[in-house]
Amino acid sequence: MPAARLRFVAGRLVQVLPVLVALLLIVVLLQQLMPGDPARVIAGPRASAEQVTQVRHDLGLDQSILAQFWKYVVNLSGGDLGRSNRTGIPIATIVGERAAVTVWLLFGGLIVSTLLAVPAALVMALRPRSPAARVCARSLTVILNCPPFWVGLMLASVLALRTGWLPVGGFGENTGDRLRSMVLPSLTIGLAAMPLLARSGAASLRQVLAADHVTTARSLGLSGWPLVRRHLLRNALPPAVTLLAVQAAALLFGAVIVEQTFGLPGLGAEMVNAASQRDFPVVQALTLIFGAAIIGINLLADLAVALLDPRTTWR
Amino acid sequence: MAMITPAAVSAVTPRASGWTRSAAAGLLALAILAAVLAPLLAPADPALLTLDQLQPPSAAHLLGTDALGRDVLSRLLFALRTDLLLMVFAAGLPMLAGTLIGAVAGYRGGVLDAALRWVADIFQALPVYVLLIAFVFVLGPGTASLLVAFSVLGWVVYARLIRTEVRRVRERDYVSASYLLGLSHTAVLFRHVLPNALRQSLVYLATDMGMALQGIAVLSFFGLGVKAGTPELGAMVSEAQLFLRSHWWLAAFPGLTIVILGSSIAALGDRLGDRLGGRPVGRLSGRLGGRLGGRGEARG
């Protein structure tokens, strides 16, 4: 029923629209919340009243909020995110230069968290009463409560400073150095995101385990790895896609923290630096980009799950 | 205000039990006691600058001194104070606001309720973490803007939980009986409906507090949280960053304190959830529950 599917996809897209508009509105309205006159901040403390007025006019700050909102949207549709207050560089250029680091970092974090979470989830789902499962559950609580910036520093202290195996921070010049400088940050993000994935993974595996076809397979004498491989993992795939999306927000925030901690030149570090130097347009643009990314990932996951799962009914 | 709230999924996960809970309760009690008695316990003024800079732990300074010659143990005790207090407010204020909004909307129903649901739906799809940084940045560093940001972003979950519960409880016989006895709407809402609807929020509050603790620490680590110089655990880690090679303990102890505090609260929150027998609540459980076929509140 392709028509029904199309309608479903269109419906989801329409649902996302108000969220995107709300995000845009918040991002534009943020400026109103800022204490002090933004034009004065940009013009500098020694600017004359006329210069401040000029800056205000140039930036369109003397127009109504609605007009400012509209202008922002129009600029955005042309790919113009504004310019940095500090350097005057177009933000689109900054994003272009730095996005790759963040994407690679997220990728590394995803690999690490999956490698750590899948075994833990399997243990907790298949042997819920075993001592191993208890240890897993308790460790997850502790890991969840470890601040990523602190974990990063501690890992750096042990694996980089003491042994010199890995660089402490920064981003190397060649590919080899760059890969090496990604190891600790990826490990940190992966650890931070892993408890979430393991817990929800265990929960969804348990649901699959309770399904009739698994009971049947078990009653036919199937157990151990063949059971897991043939009947569990495959059916846990749609929920797993959802989990990845749920993780996206956590991973992204982890990236912000970790980039700053390890001095990686990514989008997250840029946002924190811009925030501490009161560079409003950059914070504004990155809030929008991160927000839109998370909303987009969740939308894609919803669509993917609906398309993957044969039980979906198209209404 | 919370970030991710995964504890909720664990209805079927093995939960902390027995000695873990006792240990958690003990550690938390100890932390609260230490925070309350910080002025008496601290061997030195946490802000006192001395020339004994970066001393290793010794009898005079049990945890050594920092780069400005301040006694680290004293700073840790006062930081415990800052963080616990901020944590309570950063989780408590959103709960208060959300509970009031949710209760009124759920009780009155109609347009108000529909509006709340619409706003909540949009709010819950927004990226909380990123907005937290943006809000705190816009409002400027300081405890006040921290609390405002946490409240603005955190009230929605509570409003939603309370709304659903209030609508459920409202139909009960004892509530109808209260009307027959001549009680006003306000009296019925506050005396009978709300107390019975609060349980879920309390369970969620425990998880929320752990996440608030981390949020406060992270923002302070970035220099966006408490004012510079305030003893705070995240800020202490940040100050210690430069001396990681020679003085690892400066960064290790404040971070460890966050881990212990957060884990204890999480373990006790699980216990509360078990005792109240509530179904799992929270942002994540809802989102997964919804998609994986369970029930609950959605949260992004």
Image (spheres, coloured by chain):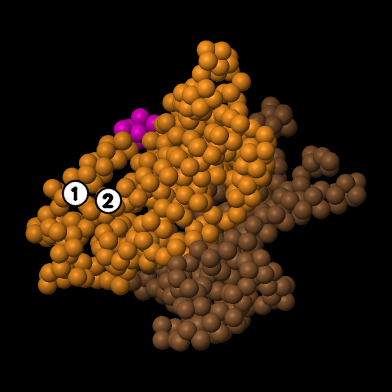
Chain colours: A brown, B orange
Task: Examine the rendered structure and indicate whether residue B110 appears above or below residue A290.
Answer: above
- Tell me residue A280's x, y (percent): 51, 72
Which residue is identified by label 1? B38
Secondary structure mainly formed by the magenta segment: helix
Please give the name of the residue rendered at 35% of the width and 50% of the height, measured from the top-left corner.
B86
**Badge 1: how crowded within 10 Å, few (<14), some, or many (20+)?**
many
Kind of residue at disc 2? Leu
> What is the chain identity of the residue bearing mark 2?
B
> What is the chain identity of the residue bearing mark 1?
B
Residues at marks 1 and 2, CA–CA distance in whole angstroms: 8 Å
Q: Foreground residue, A84 or A308?
A: A84
Q: Foreground residue, B295 or B116?
A: B116
Give the residue at the far front of this rendering. Answer: A49
Task: Examine the rendered structure and indicate whether residue B144 appears above or below residue A161.
Answer: above
- Tell me residue A281's x, y (percent): 55, 74
Q: Foreground residue, B162 or A137?
A: B162
Please give the name of the residue rendered at 47% of the width and 27% of the height, measured from the top-left corner.
B190
Please give the name of the residue rendered at 26% of the width and 54% of the height, measured from the top-left corner.
B79
Q: How many marks?
A: 2
A156 sits left or right of A200 in the view: left
- First of labels 1, 2 by sequence position: 1
Residue B96: mark in rendering? none
Q: Secondary structure at mark 2?
A: helix
The magenta stretch is B17-23
Which residue is identified by label 2? B80
- Tell me residue B157's x, y (percent): 54, 42
Q: Secondary structure at mark 1?
A: helix
- Check if residue B251 falls in the magenta segment: no
Kind of residue at disc 1? Ala
Does the rendering let one see residue A270? no
- Tell me residue A7's x, y (percent): 85, 49
* Labels 1 & 2 near each other (Cβ < 8 A): yes
